[in-house]
Amino acid sequence: MKQRILTGLGAGALFLLLLVIGGVPYELLLLLLALIGFFEFARLNGISPFHPAGLLGFAGVLFFMVPWEELGVDVPSSSAAIWLLLLLLLSVTVVSKNRFAVDGAALLLLGAVYVGFGFAAMGDVRSIEQHGLYLSFLSFACIWSSDIGAYFIGKAIGKRKLWPSISPNKTIEGSLGGIIAAIAVAIAFQLAAPETIGFGRAVAIGAVAAVAGQFGDLIQSAYKRHRGVKDSGKLLPGHGGVLDRCDSWIIVFPLLVLTGLLPL
């Protein structure tokens, strides 16, 4: 427990520091997390990250993560990049004579989009010209408060299981407590800076962050259970890997952007 607490405090302090600094340091941190996350995803699914197809997956994550527009570089659209990555991965199945099969190609494409888009969205939100830091903190605070609220409410009054076949410890009461906690934190952010964001949008951000964050956690639990592993990696002692810690983030941020709740 002591190791878990120390690791959490140290990693959390470093992350928040770079989030405040923003710019290149924060982008590089997100890129590092994304590459490690994809490494974990590939290994979790029994694919060598250093297989030619695995390297293509890394290239896909890198493409999604680099802020090409800020660098003044014209590149294909994201949809075109996804199709090109798909073509290259399927080509590996042909060249390898199915020693690397279509199942692996599908998994690596899924992993590159899942991880790459998730971390890229965090960078996009932080780089919003006005209030990028505020909106990033708001989003993370809603995610974290949902986790905390769900844990303590679930411990206190949780009785009905939310999804026992996937995550046996989660309860419906805890889930609702997490949603309420996230909305309350979002309202507090709105009241602290009413000129920055409207009340209705703040409530919507809190609700979406909580629901999507809990679903992101269930997604991670589902495929870890399917693969028969407890953690996606061992990077953070007592906490598991990058995907274990960031499973909510990489679902919440893209969804908040796609819904227009965090306009870029």
Image: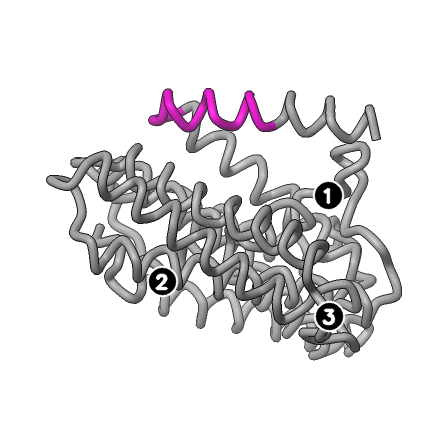
Element marked by disc 3: loop
Type of residue at label 3?
Lys
In the rendered image, is residue 52 in sight?
A: no
Question: Label 2: how many residues lie within 10 Å, few (<14), some (14-19) or many (20+)?
Answer: few
Can you give x and y, in whole percent of width and height, for residue 229 in the image?
86, 59
The furthest residue to the right:
228
Q: Which residues are magenta?
A: 12-24
Magenta span contains residue 223: no
Query: With 220 as the anchor, is 261 left or right in this view?
Result: left
Residue of label 1: 241
Height in image: 220 above or below 49?
Answer: below
Query: With 224 as the anchor, is 176 left or right in this view?
Result: left
Height in image: 37 above or below 108?
Answer: above
Can you give x and y, in whole percent of width and height, for residue 204 in the image?
30, 62
Q: Quadrant of residue 242?
A: top right
In the rendered image, is residue 129 in sight?
A: yes
Query: With 168 as the anchor, is 66 left or right in this view?
Result: left
Residue of label 2: 78
Can you give x and y, in whole percent of width and height, for residue 213 in the image?
52, 59
Structural distance between the alpha carbons of marks 1 and 2: 27 Å
